[in-house]
Amino acid sequence: MSGRLRTLLILMMPSLYLAATLLYSAYQAVWGVQVDPESAYTMNGLVAAAGYGSLKFDHPGTTTTLLVELIIRGWALVARPEDIVAFGLKHYDAITYAARTCEALVLTGALLGGGLIVGRTTRSAMAAMLFQAGAFVHPDAFHFQMVLAPESLMVAIALFGMAIVIKAALDEHPPATSLGVVSGLVFALGFSTKYLYLPQALFAVCLLRNRRALVAAMITGAIGFVGFSLIFNPGTITRGFGWLAQIATHKGNYGEGEPGFIDFGTFWSNMREIAASAPFVPGVYVAAAAAVLAWCVKTRDWRDPVTLTLSAAVLIFAAHLVATSKHFALHYMMAPWVLTGGVLVLLVVQVRRLAPAIPSAALSLLVGSLCAVVSAATLIDARAVALQSSASNAIGARLSKAVVAAGPACANVSGMFVRAPENDMNHGWDMTLQPWGDQAMRERFSRAYARAFTVPLLDHNIYTHVLKNNFRPTSYAKLSEDYPCIIVRSAAPLDAENSIGLLALEPDHCVIEGIHVYTVGLACAKVRESFLGER
């Protein structure tokens, strides 16, 4: 196969990914279903751009915050706004869309660059495409690769890092010291993006053929992570590891619940759900473990770089499986999911060495066909999710218009998950400035919002039990004095605990398309009629 044809084939998967993810993003409104966690990182990037540094250290998402900050600062250099905070709030949604697009481009670059590395190392376009198929192995992985969250950049870094691992394991020559330095830098960026990247350190075994490369990777990775964190997100060092210890020593989510490491009442059921969600992935890792065992039995050689690297991959998968089963959310498995393509490349090499009689073309065709089927299923699922999200978001936007039409003089209060286009900033506030900002910072953002928008931003938070007006705490008693009527939208029914005093005003109540609407001084039926009239 000519080099030009190989390059064209390697371009196919990144091009497909970029087209698919940008189209998927267009159906996922940033103020809609996916407001959590996107708004938190948009707000944190704005906080950093305003000169305060990062306020989030809990994932830690340093590279994600830095990306948003660079977008805002770059845009501000062109627009020359008087106040960067008001400018950022005014263009909040556009900033999130821009960050999504940048993440998609970064991941596309990782697929292309990694594919070229794997293709040149193996001299096979099929191997490169198998490696790239990792981006499509699971619907949740595809989704979180697109949204503004640490997982997106983590995936890009993990994929490029896996390409380097394959090069180090399969290259005829021992890995150069410079490759160790690059590996260390990749790890530093990955670990700065998501703490769950830590198990990837096991891939350092691919560098054992050159001890200098291994030492260079370890030193560069440690210094790179600490230096990068201290410059851009010191909380990662000073508070982040304490947060991890809290999670590790308590059975509930985010360090809650009773002391202990694992709640076995949910652990095994979570593990079964993870395996059932993408049986192809654990199947690949089980096959990798079997191939490692077969090689060790046949040759008595466990120091072989391919065998060591496959062993590391299996251990990484096991570590993520345990961590995710304990602290459950399917997308925490993203790193081993997207590395499945790279593991397949090494697995094919190992099987060919164990059974040379098997034609390489037949083996590549088999695993390639499996990857094609899994990738197609993922894209079909993503299409269904995109259409469903678009429909849900359209209902939320339509209800927002209906509320304004029914009560133009009313206090328009909305909460999280009601898909109100005007409300997404509040989640970002609740996850950054509210817990970790000082009063001067909060006041600056509140005043900036008032300058950027004429209509107050009223938020009913059923989690913190705080009612906010332009990010400042207020009360329904105060709203009833300032407005002739009040309309509140909530994703959940309100009770004495989460109503924040609204029920004391004896509101009218109705449910519109699954969203609870409470009204004071106005019949809820009027909002419903307005909603029906918005068709």
Image: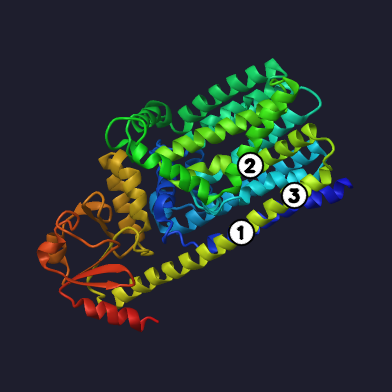
- Whether the residues at callouts 3 and 2 have beta carbons within 8 Å, the answer is no
Mark 3 to mark 2 CA distance (whole Å): 13 Å
Image quadrant where one finds the C terminus: bottom left
Q: 391 above or below 495?
A: below
Q: Is residue 30 left or right of residue 408?
A: right
Front residue of 447 and 69 = 69
Q: Position of residue 395 (x, y in %)?
A: 39, 71
Quadrant hosting residue 234:
top left
The disc, 1 or 2, on the residue closer to the chain's N-terminal end is: 2
Amino acid at the residue labelled 3: Leu
Amino acid at the residue labelled 2: Val
Q: Which residue is mark 1?
A: 377
- Whether the residues at callouts 1 and 2 have beta carbons within 8 Å, the answer is no
Q: Position of residue 363 (x, y in %)?
A: 78, 45
Mark 1 lies on a secondary structure that is helix
The disc, 3 or 1, on the residue closer to the chain's N-terminal end is: 3
| Label 2 Cα crowd, 10 Å radius (few <14 / some 14-19 / many 20+) | some
Amino acid at the residue labelled 1: Ala
- Number of the label disc, if any, that sits on residue 366: 3
Q: Is residue 289 visible?
A: yes
Q: Which residue is mark 2?
A: 284
- Number of the label disc, if any, that sits on residue 412: none
Quadrant hosting residue 437:
top left
Q: 138 above or below 182?
A: below
The tally of labels here is: 3
Front residue of 339 and 359 = 359
Q: Is residue 526 left or right of residue 303?
A: left
Q: Is residue 130 left or right of residue 535?
A: right
| Label 3 Cα crowd, 10 Å radius (few <14 / some 14-19 / many 20+) | few
Q: 432 above or below 369?
A: above
